[in-house]
Amino acid sequence: MKRFLVALPVVALAWSPALAQEVPPYHPDPGPVAGNWEWTLTGSGLSTKEFDDNAFGFTTSVGYYWTKNILFSFRQSIAFSVGSDVRDSWAGVSRVAADYQFDFGRWQPFIGVNFGGIYGKDVRNTAAAGPEIGLKYYVNESTFAFGMVEYPISFRDGIDEAVLQYSVGLGVNF
C-alpha cells in the first residue's frame, strides 16, 4: 500500500505535461486565426422621461475569417419603437460585410464595406451599401469588446439622406 501511495504522485507528475496541452482554437496571441468563426452582439435603447416614446433594438452577427485579417460576415439588426406618443413600428436591416482587420496585438482596428436591405413596418423598403470602420479590443485570446461606425447609403434616397450608425458590443472568436 505504501508503494502505491508513493507511485501515485510520481505517475500524476509524469502525466501532467500531456494534460496541460492547449485545446484549439486557443492560442497565446489575442485575435483570430484563419478559419475561425466570430459572433457578436450589441444592444441599444432610449426612452423619454415619461416613457411615452421608447425605442430599443439589437444587432447580432456571425462571420468567418478567410485569413487572419479578412472577415466575411452576416449581420442582422432589428429595432422597435413603442409608446403612447409614437406609432408602434419595427425596422430590420440584413446585410453582408467584408472587413480587413489590422493586427496590433490586443487592439485590432478594421475597415470594410457592407451591403444589404432595410425593411419593416412604416419603413420604406430599400437596399443600402456603404463603408464601415471600427476597433476591437481583445480582453483575452478570443473575447473582445468593439465599437463600429457604419454609413449605409440607401439606393432609394441617395447619399443626402444617409445617416451614421454607431454600435458598441461584445464578441467572441471560436
Image (cartoon, rainbow, N blue to C red):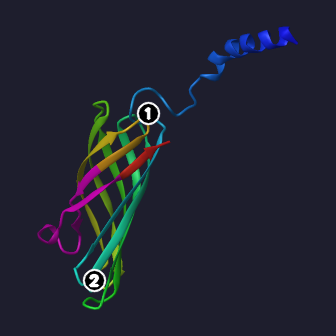
Among the 4 quarters of the image, the one containing residue 156 = bottom left
Q: Which residue is mark 1?
A: 33
Image quarter of the N terminus: top right
**How many dots with numbers?**
2
Position of residue 124 relative to residue 19, above or below, is: below
Q: Which residues are drawn in magenta?
A: 147-169
Q: As drawn, is 106 to the left or to the right of 155?
A: right
State the image coordinates of residue 142 (x, y, percent, origin top left).
44, 38
* Residue 27 versus residue 165 in the image, above or below: above
Can residue 42 be seen? yes
Residue on which the image places disc 2: 51
Task: Find residue 29 and report its horizontal and vertical position in percent.
Answer: 40, 28
Label of residue 108 in the image:
none
Query: At x 56% / y 26%, what residue is drawn?
Result: 22
Residue shown at 29%/80% (left/top)?
Answer: 54
Q: Is 34 located above or below residue 13 in the figure?
A: below
